[in-house]
Amino acid sequence: MKYNIVIYQDEDGVYIAECPSIPGCVSQGITEQEAEKNIRSAIQECLEVRREKGLPLTISSKVVEV
């Protein structure tokens, strides 16, 4: 499956990666590439835990105009 991710650099220079469609699915890395690699693993682990707990695997998201 394909999931959207967001990667940004924090104030300490660390890259943070999040998967907005999976609550709490966050990782980090020293480089953007490392953060992307780490979020792939985090997505797999988060989905496994959500599956075990009987939670919905993902949540829906919408785009709104402001």
Image (cartoon, rainbow, N blue to C red):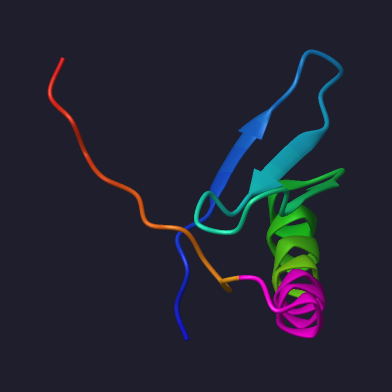
What number of labels is visible?
0
Q: Main secondary structure of the magenta part?
A: helix
Instruction: Indicate yes or no whether the magenta region holds residue 52.
Output: yes
Q: Which residue lies most toward the front here? A: 54
Give residue 56's position: percent from left, percent from top: 56, 71
Residue 10 against residue 14 in the figure, above or below: above
> What are the residue bounds of the magenta stretch?
44-55
Q: Residue at x 81, y 24 (%)?
A: 13
- Which quadrant holds residue 34? bottom right
**Residue 12, above or below 39:** above
What x and y, as percent, mark residue 14?
83, 32
What's the residue at 34%, 49% (across, down)?
61
Q: Quadrant of the C terminus?
A: top left
The one of 31 and 55 positioned closer to us in this rendering:
55
* Residue 46 magenta: yes
Query: Is 32 above or below relative to 55?
Result: above
Occupied quadrant, residue 45: bottom right
Side of 66 relative to 54 (left or right) = left
* Drawn side of residue 12 relative to residue 7, left or right: right
**What percent of the width, then of the height, locates residue 20?**
53, 49
Q: Is residue 7 above or below residue 59?
A: above
Q: Position of residue 26 (x, y in %)?
A: 75, 49
As rendered, which of 66 and 6 lies closer to the eye?
66
Q: Is residue 52 left or right of residue 63?
A: right
Tell me what residue is drawn at x 59 percent, y 59 percent. Answer: 22
